[in-house]
Image: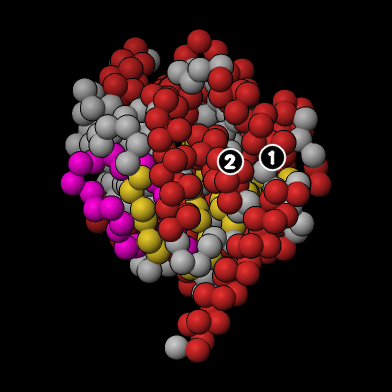
Amino acid sequence: MKIALVSEHASPLAIAGGVDSGGQNIYVAHVARQLHRAGHQVDVFTRRDRALLPAVSDMDGVRVVHVPAGPPTQMSKEDLLPFMPEFADFLVGFCRRERIPYDVMHANFFMSGMAALKVKAALGIPLVTTFHALGKVRRIHQGADDGFPDARFAIEDELVRRSDAIIAECPQDAQDLREHYDSDPSRVEIVPCGFDPAEFGPMDRAAARRALGWPSDRFAVLQLGRLVPRKGIDTVVRALAKLRMVAGIDAHLYVVGGNAEMPNEIATPEIARLRGIAAGCGAAEHVTFVGRRGRSQLREFYAAADVFVTTPWYEPFGITPIEAMACARPVIGADVGGIRYTVVDGETGFLVPPRDPDTLAERLSRLARNPALGERMGQAGLERVHASFTWARVARMLEEVYRRVAQAPADDDYLVGERTSRRQRAGSAHAAVGRA
């Protein structure tokens, strides 16, 4: 197949860990690579956010097309909606110029879907949509802090109606689509996120700590990911203070992430807020902000920790718990969204209520006092992610969805004709290549 992945703000070439660079970037990069390895031709369309970027970059055989839409500078994703008509016009023109038409488009996030709908209307290319986060759910949890306009809701409603298939990343995501968007269950497929065994796997804890310069005998708690308020890192800081003062555990929290390699309160304002909370609860000396790290360095951090903790207010999926389990580490996660799906409470770690430092401190104390329990949970998590959450498996599941929508009849007479024409053009092109 020839597949177009659309990801307007989340480039697969970006370094994860910044405010607008996280799970979606990782998802698009790994899905694209796995589909290419399976023999498909894959193009990724993402907004041009730097003036010196080439029109097209190569990523391990995948074409990454930098779409000129808005100024070629980095912008918050909340400010990109006005530039999506320009993004859509470029997509339509690019698709029309392609010698072999795309069999399917996979839009990631609602703005990518908005642009892809115009391509579907113009050229009849089937559309698969992964929202990665739903606007109505975000508004429930963030309220006035949600920077997206209300127009997002109508766009998402239209995408739910007009997409040929919708990818929900976990059962909670599918439930939210039903409850808030009245989605058709027959067009919703649950396909999770994943991890790459070449990136993440068990390694010796002592060796990892030596490499990072961590003390060998201190109970180490790891928080890794984007540093934004909704990730609930303040809950982890408060739990650490309670773990030390109430339970008497010599524990230290390492926070990896941010917009710069050196922890910088100007580049990453959330660090300033968290440092203030740590100082207020007497834990300032026991919290280390590491800064952003590249993907190749993350395995050592997971391996060096005694436990990985992630307690967001809500989480559409959450890739970091899977990565931690792939490194055979127990995970304590908030009982929300995708974390509820990936972490098996009492088996691969613990689920705790969000914004509840007391319960989190109690679960941390259990693991600190019983290292064998943490080892058993880590091994159970390792088995679970290899069975269910590899990127190779995710790509195979997506392939099945793509093939089904590509072969399905179109929704109206115009699209039937356009889709038939596309297939005839593709057949002619393939035949010409064969004769050559």
Dot 2 falls on a residue whose secondary structure is helix
Q: Residue at x 45, y 88 (%)?
A: 436
User: If the image is split into quadrants, where does the N terminus sit?
Assistant: bottom right
Q: Is residue 421 visible?
A: yes
Q: Is residue 46 magenta?
A: yes
Q: Residue furthest bottom?
A: 435
Q: Is residue 285 left or right of residue 150?
A: left
Q: CA distance from mark 2 to mark 1?
A: 8 Å
Vertical side of 253 occupied by 265: above or below: above
Q: Nearer the viewer, residue 33 or 72?
A: 72
Which numbered dot is residue 117? 2
Residue type at mark 2: give it: Leu
Query: Horizontal and vertical percent for residue 302?
Result: 41, 51
Q: Is residue 302 visible to us here?
A: no
- Magenta range is 42-59
Q: Position of residue 108 (x, y in %)?
A: 53, 44
> Does residue 143 lie above or below 216 as drawn?
above
Instruction: Provide the secondary structure element on which disc 1 rests.
Output: helix
Viewer-closest of 79 and 422: 422
Q: What residue is drawn where x is 21% and y is 23%?
A: 266
Q: Is residue 225 above or below residue 240?
A: below
Tell which of 401 and 316 is nearer to you.
401
Please rate how many residues cluster around mark 2, counting C-alpha atoms within 10 Å: few if below 14, some from 14 to 19, many from 20.
many
Label 1, on which residue?
162
Could you tell me the amino acid type at mark 1? Answer: Arg
Disc 2 + disc 1, Cβ < 8 Å: yes
x, y percent for residue 276: 31, 15
- Place of residue 140 in the rendered image (x, y in percent of width and height, measured from the top left): 61, 18
